[in-house]
Structures are given as C-alpha cells and as structure tokens.
Amino acid sequence: MEFIFSYYRKRVKMRTIVLTMILTSVLSAAAQDDFSAWHNSDKWLKASDAMLNPTNNRQLVGKPGNGVLVNGEEGNRPSLVTKRRDYRDVEVHIEFMIAKGSNSGVIFHGNYEIQIRDTHGVRKPGPGDCGGIYPQAEAEPIYHHIGGGSAPRINAAKPHGQWQTLDIIFQSPRFDESGNKTAHAEFVKVVHNGVVIQENVEVPYACGTNWDRQQYPKGPIIIQGDYGPIAIRNIRVRDYEPGAEHVPVPPEGFTALFNGKDLTGWRVYPKVKAMWSIENGVLKSHGLLEEWGADLVTEKEYRDYVLMADFRMPTDSDSGIHFRNMAPVMLGKMGDAEQFNIRSRAGMGQLESFHFMPENMKLSDEQFPKVKYIDPEIGVWHTVKLTVAGQNITAELDGEVILDSFVYPEGILSTKPNPIRFQKHRFTEGDEPGERNPCPIEFRNIFIRELEPSESSGPGEPGESNSELVKLLARIDTQSLPSGYYPQKYQDYVDRRMAGLSEAQRAQVGKLWQEKQRIDPDMPNRGQSFVKIMEYVAGNLKEIAGNEEKREK
C-alpha cells in the first residue's frame, strides 16, 4: 500500500500534511469517473481519495485524481443535480464521507430527502439524523420541524472521516390522467452501512420548509453540497421495477453469501430444499421440521471474518448461527459447532456451548460470556453482526454491542476454517398440550468480509488485541516530542522522517494513524499525535520488520 503526502495551503499560509491511501473506485451515474452525468460537478474538487484534514477535523482534503468529488475545504459548493430529470422509481447507491458536524442529503425530485449528517453515537436518532427521512419544517420565527419525516430504525452512522454507504430504493408518487395524486411517494428501503434503517415509508409531503410545494411523478436526483464538507464516490443509479427480484448490495469490502435468487454457494440437502423458499430476496422457512437436518450451510469454509445478516421472526421463534467448530473435547456434548442463538425471547445472543460444558471443565463466573440480553421485536427486521477472530467473538444487534470481545477459554473451540450454518430449528413444544411451534425464521442481506491475520489481531503487532492497541496508542501519546521537531517546520520534518522509513514501516504508520483517528477523532493536536506515532515506528524498526517477516511466513 502506497502513502502519498500532499500540500494544502490555507489563508495563513500554514502547510499541513495529508496522508492518503490510493484506492481504486468505479464511479457511475453514467458509467464513468468524470461525473459528466451531474450538473455542477465541475464546481467540486476531483480527488482519488478523501480524509479529514489532520489539523482540522471539520474539513476534508484529498489527493488530486479521479473517482472522488469533494465539495471544497469549507464544504460550500452548488449541489450536484442529475442531468437526467425524468427519474421515477430508482435504486441509488452512494458512498460518502463527511467531516465533523457536517450535513448533506440525497434528494429525489427536489422534494424527498434522505438525510446525511454527522450523528454517530446518537442513542435515539430522529428524522433529522443520518439516514432519516427529513421532516417538514418552517423557517419562522426560527427554523423548526413541524412533523412528518421518519427516524432511522437504528443509528448505523460511522464516525466522521470514514467512508459510509447508502442504498436507497425510491418509488415516485402516482397521478391519474387529470393530475390528481393517487399514491404518495415512498421510500421502499434505505440501507445504511449494510443495515436496513427504513422500509416501506410513505412520504405524503415534500421535506423541509417546502413541504407544501407541488409534487411530480418524475424528477432529478440531487446531492446537497452547501451545508458542510462531504466527499462522494461510487454513485450508481438505475431504474427500479416494483416487485422485481431483490439483489443484495454488500457494504464496501463485503461479499454476499446469498445472491437473493437461489442457493448458489450453499449445500442443498433434501431437507433444505423442502424447508426453505426464496421470495423477493428473502430466505424463508415457516414449515414445521420434525427432525434436524435443514440448516443452511455454506459450501465454502471460513476462519476469521465479519458476518452481517438481517433476520425476522414472524412469531415466537428460535434459530441461530453456527460459527466455529468445537474442540475435540467438546464433541458429542452439544453437536459439532458453536452456536450464536437467535431467539425471540430469553436468550438472544447466548453462546450454546456454555450450557453443555462437561463436568471436568467447570468454569468460573468470570469465564462465562457476559451477554446483554435484548429480545428482538417479533415481525420486525433486525440486523446481527458477528466478528469472529481466533478465540474471540464480538456480537452486535441492530448496531448495539451485546457481546463485547469475548475470548473463549482454551479447549472449547477449534480455530480451523469451517462452514457457517444458519439454523432451521426443529419444532418446539407449545404452552398447550400437543401444541408445536414450527419456529419460523427469515434471513436476507447475508454479507461476509474475511479477515486477514493482520486484521484479526488489529493494526498493531501480531496477536495484539484491540484493548492492547488502545493501550499502545495511549503509551505513544505519553512520549515526548523529539528535540529536532519544531511545529513551524512540521511538513519538512515529517517529509524527511518518512523518507527514511521502509514501505512496510510507512504502512505501519498509516495503520496506527487510522486507528488513532478512529478511537480519538477529537484529539486536540493532530499534528503532534501523528509525529509521535511516526517516531514510535521509527524507534522500533527492528521489532516491526521482524513482525512483518512473521506475517509473510
């Protein structure tokens, strides 16, 4: 991976350093990377990538090139408007990055807006937060919302300075031959960073202060450019046919395990064929299973990965995801694989093996996983995310961590690659005599990102956990600045020091700097923090080179 340093001059003639990674992107609203399908694209800055300004996280900067547009350092450029103005029902994919406190939106027909805003960490997002359908508003006596809109189901926003994705299916309002509206506009689905946050939401009025303006059956698509810094890339727009087959769109870096139309990539046993159906991109199993053997099993085997999946339980139900094979000592106690439970009540997120421990493996209370139990709402789509790395698992439900970096005691799990299984539970006994619950379950949007060994252990040294990495960065912060460093000559000093590092060491600086920005986005002196990381790497050349050699082996 190559790192490029570029200069950016402000009014005070201060020079700042910009560390940018070269990424390949394919941009299309017209299948090209020059944004010629958009009005005002010539008034935005072209770049090959974007990032926060290291000395001001309320600004974005980028490396000159193609594939990315940035609306200027101050984030105030004319909005992008499609030259095509006759969009009706459409699917839109956009990748964006915003600075701290920034604000933008994707607007259909000039009337209906999905909000883009820096609202990472907001516990109860509203319609004006990222992913929300913007509400009606009035400007007098001061700007205020007056109703309407739709809050995202959960807050899926990432911190400012990170690339994010929005996938939107919009259905235009319907009118009869006399021009009378017969059906409201509708956001069929909004997926933010791989998480479904809006579904089948009608929008009777235009958004914002123009809520009573005239509505039309067709119009352009707009990306707001005058409310704060935003960078965009990989825009895809295509006409949408209501009722057409759903094609899953994985988040950046992920691949789809389920293609939305058939069981390609899965082992299709007779019971699987009998018990599962596919409807508009959804895997459904509502029937009653007498005996085990209808689990969905991947053909490919996986070791370390991040797995995301939407699930819905039409009634009280029980299912699960088998993510690791058991160690030999555990075989025969609970089956051959560990299970992350998916239950409508009393057990969402439980790890099954801990209920089947052999007598000779008694565990202390501290060794048991501390699960935050949340009963998923019945009939509603939810998103589960599992990060499996070695003996470690982290689990999220609808963006909330319910199992935080749990490390298995030795001797329970095998860490060899194995298939992933989505369970179809056999029937359970109901409350009444003879009553049997078929445990119905539905899955969709099943995505996976395989982790390299270096990712599994974090961007620090091999084997280093995330908590250890946080400690390392805290220790680096306590270092004194080098005696030859002067803030007034920051750029010259950094250029000289980086030139003396190998490619592997420059990559190490980049990884640590990325992690530092992730865990401490509001660091008070970004330049000094970068210099300290660089000096740490420069002072540990032999140690880091040895670690890189181990990784290659």
Image: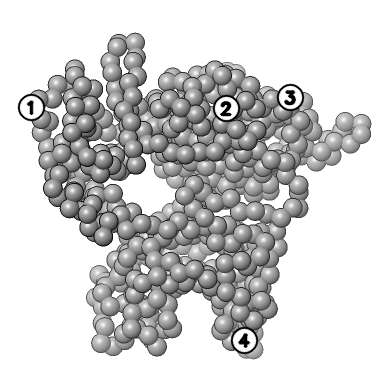
> Mark 1 touching mark 4, by CB under 8 A?
no
Badge 2 density bin: few <14, some 14–19, many ≥20, Cα 10 Å: some
Q: Which residue is mark 2?
A: 34
The residue lying at 29 percent from left, 25 percent from top is: 17
What amino acid is labelled 2 in the image?
Asp
The residue lying at 49 percent from left, 68 percent from top is: 300
Helix, strand or loop at label 1? It is loop
- The alpha-carbon separation of the residues under discs 1 and 4 comes to 74 Å
Front label number (3 vs 2): 2
- The alpha-carbon separation of the residues under discs 3 and 2 comes to 33 Å
In the picture provided, is 428 more to the left or to the right than 120? right
Disc ID at residue 213? 3
What amino acid is labelled 4 in the image?
Glu
Q: Earlier in the sequence, mark 4 or mark 2?
A: 2
> Mark 2 touching mark 1, by CB under 8 A?
no
Disc ID at residue 290? 4
Front label number (2 vs 1): 2
Q: Earlier in the sequence, mark 3 or mark 1?
A: 3
Helix, strand or loop at label 2? It is loop
Front label number (3 vs 4): 4
The residue lying at 59 percent from left, 41 percent from top is: 93
What amino acid is labelled 3 in the image?
Arg
Front label number (4 vs 2): 2
